[in-house]
Image (cartoon, rainbow, N blue to C red):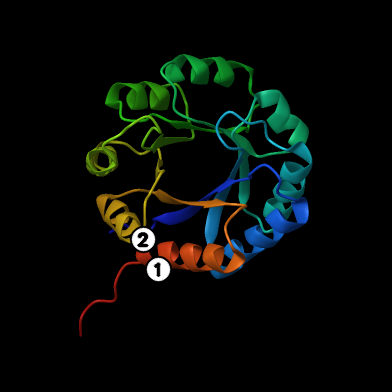
Amino acid sequence: MSSATSLYLDFEIDAGSTAAHASSLLNAACDAAPIESVLIRAPEGSALDEAIARTLIAQIQKRNIAALVASSLDEATKLGADGIHLPWSRDIVRQFKTLKQSAPSGTVIGVDAGRSRHDAMEIAEAGADYVAFGVPPHVEDRERAAERQLDLVSWWHELFEIPCVAFDVDDADAAHSLAEAGADFVAVRLTSADPEQTVAVKAREFSEALKTPEPAK
């Protein structure tokens, strides 16, 4: 297992959430475990609540954690985010290259390559800051998809230096396996609809799963 495997918080802000509530949950997660990066996103098909996102981004950056959004470049810039995460799509390579050309220098851009080795390599060669391997929502056989994700992470770790992030991780056991395979980051998915205690427990469990066990005496 890589000792460098870090926790990445994938935080979905559900409709109807308030800034105060989302902020409280974010604090609970960050207090429970060391988190290196936070992605703020809205549910699929919904727009990001800018007021909540702006509050959370400031909160994240105050902790010296990178704050990313799954949004447009204009919105990310307006919100003061450190970067952008591009979710998987069938034309993800074109999307990334177009964004890369217009993004200001220093903007962090991470890209979910889904299940495609070819797309992952092309995205990396074009200058992505990290390549992510997730499980696209349309995939029905989740167990087989998780096995393929593990294989992709292992392959990437052996051949490439650009960091990889494992998204859509079901539980702490899966997080442990992905860390053993060489993932640089493992994402814990939380939502603003989760109870505060659940948020803290899940963040802590994932963080513990990423640690290298103590050697036997």
Estimate the x, y position of residue 14 in percent, counting from the top left: 63, 44
* Residue 100 higher or lower than 194, as above or below: above
Estimate the x, y position of residue 182 in percent, counting from the top left: 30, 50
* Residue 139 higher or lower than 195, as above or below: above
Which picture quadrant has residue 167?
A: top left
Instruction: Please indicate whether residue 129 sits to the left or right of residue 41 in the image.
Output: left
Q: What type is the residue that disc 2 sits on? A: Ala
Q: Which residue is mark 1?
A: 208
Tell me if label 1 and label 2 are in contact, CB under 8 Å.
Answer: yes
Instruction: Please indicate whether residue 158 sits to the left or right of residue 31 in the image.
Output: left
- Residue at x 49%, y 34% (from the top left corner): 129
Foreground of the two, 197 or 211: 197
Please tell me whether mark 1 sits on a helix, a strand or a loop: helix
Which picture quadrant has residue 84?
A: top right
- Residue at x 60%, y 53% (from the top left corner): 193
Which circle marks residue 172 in the picture? 2
* Residue 105 higher or lower than 9, as above or below: above
Q: What type is the residue that disc 1 sits on? A: Glu
Foreground of the two, 10 or 2: 10
Estimate the x, y position of residue 76 in percent, counting from the top left: 69, 32
